[in-house]
Amino acid sequence: MSFKRNILDLRKRKKEAQQGGGEKAIEKQVAMGKKTARERIKAILDENSFHEYDLFVEHTGRDFDMEKKVLHGDGVIIGTGTMYNQPVAIYAQDFTVAGGSLGLMHARKITKIMDHALKMRVPLIGINDSGGARIQEGVNSLAGYGEIFYRNTNASGVIPQISVILGPCAGGAVYSPALTDFVFVVENISKMFITGPGVIKSVLGEEISMEDLGGAMIHSEITGNAHFFAKSEDECFAQIKKLITFIPWNNAQKALKFPVQEPLSKRSIEEIVPVDPHHPYDIRDIIKAVTDGSDFFEIMEYFARNIVIGFGRIQGNTIGFVANQPMYLAGVLDCDSSDKAARFIRYCDAFNIPIVTLEDMPGYLPGVDQEHAGVIRHGAKLLYAYSEATVPKVTVIIRKAYGGGYIAMNSRHLGADFVFAWPTAEIAVMGPEGAANIVFKKEIDEAENPAEMRKQKIQEYKDKFANPFVAASKGYIDEVIEPAETRARLIHSLEVSASKVDQRPARKHGIPPF
Amino acid sequence: MEENNPNYQIFVVNSARYLTLTTTKYDRRKKWQALDPKEVRSIIPGSVIEIFAAVGQEMKAGQAILTLDAMKMYTKVEMPFDGVIKSIDVAKGDRVPKNTLLVTIE
């Protein structure tokens, strides 16, 4: 009998706490074009699968009259649920409660769900929408951030960590997403920066809008902090749901196998690539010509577009693709593209995802800005990542494989398991133009008609080296294949590599050049 | 298909000329220029709170030219070598971004 009273009391308390910051604050949130924290969780997880914990947690602020304030759930919702019937852990900051500001208990809730996620070996999804540290709680909020970063780092490479930026995420708050695997941003909603426009204006007198300083496109295109850009929250949630189909639930598992599909062949693969190696094409068309259902899920689409990374499936298995993009900057390697590819390779390696590399690049981007930006150090990341990776690694050289870039793009020398080349491949220390200028400098300088001689010598070099057969004669590539055979060779080589065992020396950890 | 895209530009790598698109970030990059040692520039953003030098003044290497209040620290900007102040290019109270011309030495 008395049970009923208790249950009714519980329901009342729950209802009140679930209101978060109350109707007015929710109205404000909606007016900004944003969903509430609860709606977001609902939109990402399987229907009715969410279970919330720590709903009744209260903040511990005792200064500046904070003790008189009630902050429901302390501005963050944590819990577990499922995606595709597989368990996941999730938290969402609630901007309607004290601006989603992070105090000690708010952080404790987040670290609690992080600890669960790591122990249970399930993915962690964090939805960020917070004004930052709760100033009234002083150093306790800093402690909170630090404890989150520590757990992000511990979980790195063990469980997938996904950050969704759906509001402001400024100051110390930005570093949790930066430590996670994938960062999702939404136009006009996501704002990330260390120092906001206000401070920049007061210190420097520079006026800049939030969107131009740290908006979604800036982080997608310029900084490389974000991996997925969406125009709306709904599009963002669809991206998260798609990403999760490609990745394993933890580092001891493999990604889910899907039913095999043939690529949707719109046109033959050799038609995509111009014969003239100076002419561009979209490398993603080649990827789509070899993946199941021609499905390719691109990551960091707008950043360092001269290299393409992302997931596709071959024979139902997730594959990480790394491919030079001749369409942008001729597909050169540079600081940003090396950095982008290297991190993705390490992701694939950590989560047992085989890597297929498609190569067509003329070398490293020349320029003072590149040298001074540290292209040596950044370029080395790519060498490190490929050499370190022990998952199956297959390379297909489509056209140009020149110089240091040839080595870097998962060459045999860095431990590639299989290297295939199209008959159009040019594997050489540099392109014919540059090489002829050096090798035949004397002949060209002394010729009556240097331009004609140069042309002749370029052709001579081309005939001799601009092909895959010199490298094939050394065994550096395993097979010269016809373009139409590419998918079949990938299928076979990945099947052969399925139980690959490759050991690295025992050590605490390597020291990659980051 | 995209071979005839009118936005393609010529892009030279190791003497070879490639047709390709460029990226926003690439287009925005700053051209490198050699530094003029006679131009003293701010190495950190901040506010000029005090100026010790005057135009025409002869100064020794290491002498303080001005004080920059940057990142809650008063940073003295010093003469890099002996010389005469040709111009002072900021005023007391100015907020200056990084790499702003502060003083020119003759």
Image (cartoon, coloured by chain):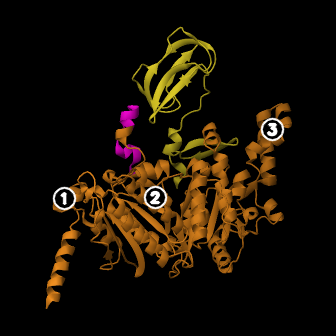
Chain colours: A orange, B yellow
Task: Sort mark 2 into few (<14), some (14-19) or many (20+) by Cα contacts within 10 Å.
Answer: some
Q: Nearer the viewer, residue B2 or A173?
A: A173
The residue labelled by disc 1 is: A27
Q: Are marks 3 and 1 on the same chain?
A: yes
Q: Residue at x 34, y 40 (%)?
A: A198
The reply, left or right, for residue A299 in relation to residue A52 is right
Could you tell which of marks 3 and 2 lies nearer the N-terminus?
Answer: 2
Q: Residue at x 86, y 31 (%)?
A: A446
Given the current orientation, which residue lies at the most extreme bottom position? A1
Q: Which residues are magenta?
A: A200-215
Whether label 3 touches label 1, CB < 8 Å? no
The residue labelled by disc 3 is: A453
Callout 2 secondary element: helix
Q: Are marks 2 and 1 on the same chain?
A: yes
Could you tell which of marks 3 and 1 lies nearer the N-terminus?
Answer: 1
Which quadrant holds residue B84?
top right
Residue A313, position as x, y percentages in the image: 54, 74
Task: Sort mark 3 into few (<14), some (14-19) or many (20+) by Cα contacts within 10 Å.
Answer: some
Chain letter of mark 2 equals A
Q: Is residue A206 above or below residue A42?
A: above
> Which mark's residue is nearer the viewer, 3 or 2?
2
Q: On the rendered image, what quadrant is the N terminus of chain A found in? A: bottom left
Rendered image: mark on residue A81: none
Asked whether residue A210 is drawn in magenta, I would say yes
Residue B8, position as x, y percentages in the image: 53, 45
Q: Amino acid at mark 2?
A: Gly
The residue labelled by disc 2 is: A146
